Image (cartoon, grey):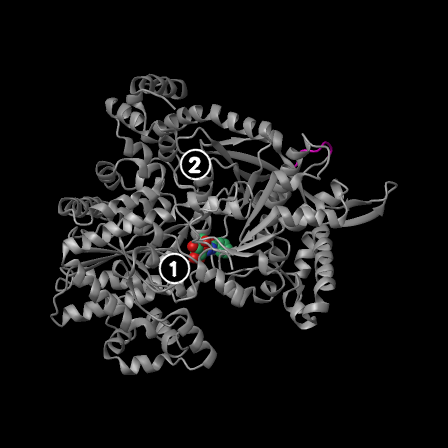
Amino acid sequence: MALTKEQFITEFKDMALRLYAAPIEDLSSQQLYQALALLTRSYIAKPWADTKARYDEEETKQVFYFSIEFLPGRLLQSNLLNLGILDEVEAGLKELDLHPDKIFDAEADPGLGNGGLGRLASAFMDAMASVGMAGNGNGIRYQYGLFKQAFVNGYQVELPDDWMRNGFPWETRKENRAVTVKFGGWVELRPSRGGHLRVIYHNTDDVLAVPYDVAMVGYHNGVVNNLRLWSAEAPIHAGTHFSLEQRERINQITQILYPDDSDNAGKELRLRQEYFFTSAGIQSIVRHYRRTHNSMAGFADRVAIHINDTHPAMAIPELMRVLMDDEHVGWDEAWRITLKVMSYTNHTLLSEALEVWPIDMFRGLLPRIYQIVQEIDRRFRLAFVPQFGQAMIDRIAPLGNGQVRMAYLATIGSHAVNGVAPLHSELLKKDVLHDLFQIFPERFNNKTNGITPRRWIQIGDRPLAHLLDKKIGTAWRQNPLALRKLHDFIDDKRFLSDLNATKAENKRELAKYIDQMVHVKVDPDAIFDVQIKRLHAYKRQLLHVLGILDAYLAIKRGEKRPKRLHIFGAKAAPSYVYAKEIIKVMNAVANMVNSDPEVSPYLQVVFLPNYGVTMAEKIIPGADISEQISTAGKEASGTSNMKLMSAGALTLATLDGANIEIKNAVGDDNIEIFGLTEKEIAGYYQRGDYRSRDFYEKDPRLHAVLDMLVNGKIPGIETEGRDIYNALLMYNDEYFVLADFESYLAANARVDKLYQQPQLWAKKVLVNIAESGRFSADFTVQRYGREIWHVLPQTPEDDGSDTEG
Ligand code: BZD
């Protein structure tokens, strides 16, 4: 859109006055933020309405991305960027003697997700709008987001995240689009005169689902898509009264986000949440479709529904329910439509994370949906037992072992199933969904994850963005593949030193931020070594810590090393005891290292509390090293690996998830790979001959480091050191930390050496930035759009990086 600085100034002052009846000089940063957000929203309103009208008029096929989590990050700056008015607005604010960053920092970060899965959903929303795809989000408007993390005496404590305290200016309540979601009770099936069954519900608990819509603004293209978040309220029928207690129970449904990213707790409230937003979404899609069509026959040509992990997998029986019970479509036709509409992404191979529900709980809460799942199960068995045998079908039918098995249901009810990086997609076929792959091989495909360079470079890394503009022009802002132009300058010494200077500037900024956050003065000349992600044993923050302890001991012995600053950000699920013990040890090690005057000139460690999207934007630009050190075969893809690469950090990685694609993109010389491969680890499992103790006994450095966990040398740790020591030695180190220790240290030594050669280092930085464009989520959603959702034409020139098979 077009907006001059002068126009902006007038409109902004006007908005502030209308809102607060005061001149801008008298307003707090929060008030200035509210005024600016509302003004920005007023710019979005028209293209938002126009986009919707155009989709309806042109009968565009629309994608609905169902996800129980979204992590959009702050929206003010990104909306201004995508509208094309960020520079004008910032210039205007400065002319008014205001500080844009202070205003941007007043925005709360909606933490409506745990980590990668939720962030991916939001990256896809931004990407779909930016490539002009009709893509809608469907999720939950949690009153409280992911807990705020604080450290007390080095222990994680969790505080509520009241993110809407000052309101959420980006949402629009659409009370006229509310739908009713039914729980519990029992159903009566009564044959009716028309020949179809009438389904009569008795004694249900009804909940009103009220949508709140959030605009998803496309980049410089006038497109504005919709993210619809549902909130639970007590219904308002005449004659029914709800006690306070009943209202409480209803409100609970959308009150909190479950803070676990790696375990299926099997709690009824979670099942309620899943059905609540799924049913509301399906009902509202069908209702909208039926306003302009008098049958459901063409539904699948206009609608694609994507199931982001299994949490919304009830979309399958729910669409069947609506088609049959409300629209009177027969089973076979309803199933044909459902299969064509639904697609499913799996995000994990960890067995403890795969969702299953006890049949009793499921049937009690969702009696009609359970009947439909039973029928899906019955027909699946009937169709495939003859060819594949009872034993195999028993293993993978939707119902078995007294449970509803959501990944199997999702696979059986979708026309496409994908993993999120090639290795992950292969392992899905080999292990978790192996039997279903035998039956439906054509459904399985890979779609490697992506990120949005708009947020991570254009907004998060302004110094780099400007340097790129100067050197290769601004085309990369539209098409990140244009970053490849950087290769032309691999021998341009001036540019290489500019790259280093830009990183140095970012590191000084990050050093200031660290000081503000944790009051540690860090040396901006150190190597900034970053590991930011959820805390999980398989992600192996512990391996990183053992590496730090080894460096500590070496420095104590008098060894000189290039200075390293280790930066961690990581939340642990509140119930994940082992992860919390690791956090305590990390904090204790940080204290020990930072307060030792012999050591701290060479080594510092900071663990920034409350890691999230906004903090990531502050950390990533200052990173030299990106630690991606999961046990091979465990990390489905990872996406912080892509973000850090795009900021020019060198990846220190195992051959896991999308690290493998990064290696293929930059070449072996521009990444540091170490550790066991997935095949080698599978070999250990098969033979059953991994003995962690052997590594401890053979390697004196490892021996010394592990002993520190139990010999009282790390001040402040109690039983945590012993528990971790036992997990590694008595319980045989489930995640192969000890097996990879030696090669991890060797890779770190190579990094130290490389860093001593600034020009050589800068070349690697250059190649990483140059090759990061392929990981733009714009390309990822286009591959989904062509190959799964069929909302874009198939094009032969697809780069083939997500080939099927
Ligand atoms: O999904 C993550 C994977 O671990 C990453 O490897 C991958 O890059 C991203 C995106 O595909 N999985 C999650 O983030 N999972 C969750 O957050 C989650 C949340 C609730 C319940 C179960 C898992």
Whole-number angstrom distance, CA of label 2 to CA of label 1: 32 Å
Q: Are marks 2 and 1 in contact (CB under 8 Å)?
A: no
Single out the residue that lies furthest toward the right.
193
Q: Which mark is residue 130?
A: 2
* Quadrant assignment, res 305: top right
Position of residue 552 relative to residue 294, above or below, is: below
Dot 1 falls on a residue whose secondary structure is loop
Q: Of 327 and 705, which appears nearest the observer? A: 327
Label total for image: 2
Residue 62 on the magenta segment? no
Q: What predominant SS class does the magenta segment belong to? A: loop
Q: Amino acid at mark 1?
A: Leu
Q: Earlier in the sequence, mark 2 or mark 1?
A: 2
Q: Position of residue 710 (x, y in %)?
A: 29, 75
Look at the image and tell me in which quarter the N terminus lies.
top left
Which residue: 61% across, 60% down?
440
Residue at the extreme front: 796
Which residue is rendered at x = 50% and y = 49% of the image? Answer: 257
Q: Specify whether residue 573 is in view.
A: no
Q: Residues within 10 Å of mark 1 (few under 14, many from 20)?
A: many
The residue beneath circle 1 is: 535
Percent of width and height locating residue 349 = 49, 63
- Position in image of residue 403 (x %, y %): 65, 63
Q: Which residues are magenta?
A: 233-239
Q: Does 238 appear in magenta?
A: yes
Asked if one can make out residue 218 in the rendered structure from this viewpoint, the answer is: yes
From the viewer's perspective, is 246 left or right of 139? right
Considering the numbered disc 2 on the image, is that residue within a helix, a strand or a loop? helix
Amino acid under label 2?
Answer: Ser
Q: Residues within 10 Å of mark 2 (few under 14, many from 20)?
A: many
Q: Is residue 276 left or right of 781 when viewed as pictured?
A: right
- Residue found at x 52% / y 63%: 428
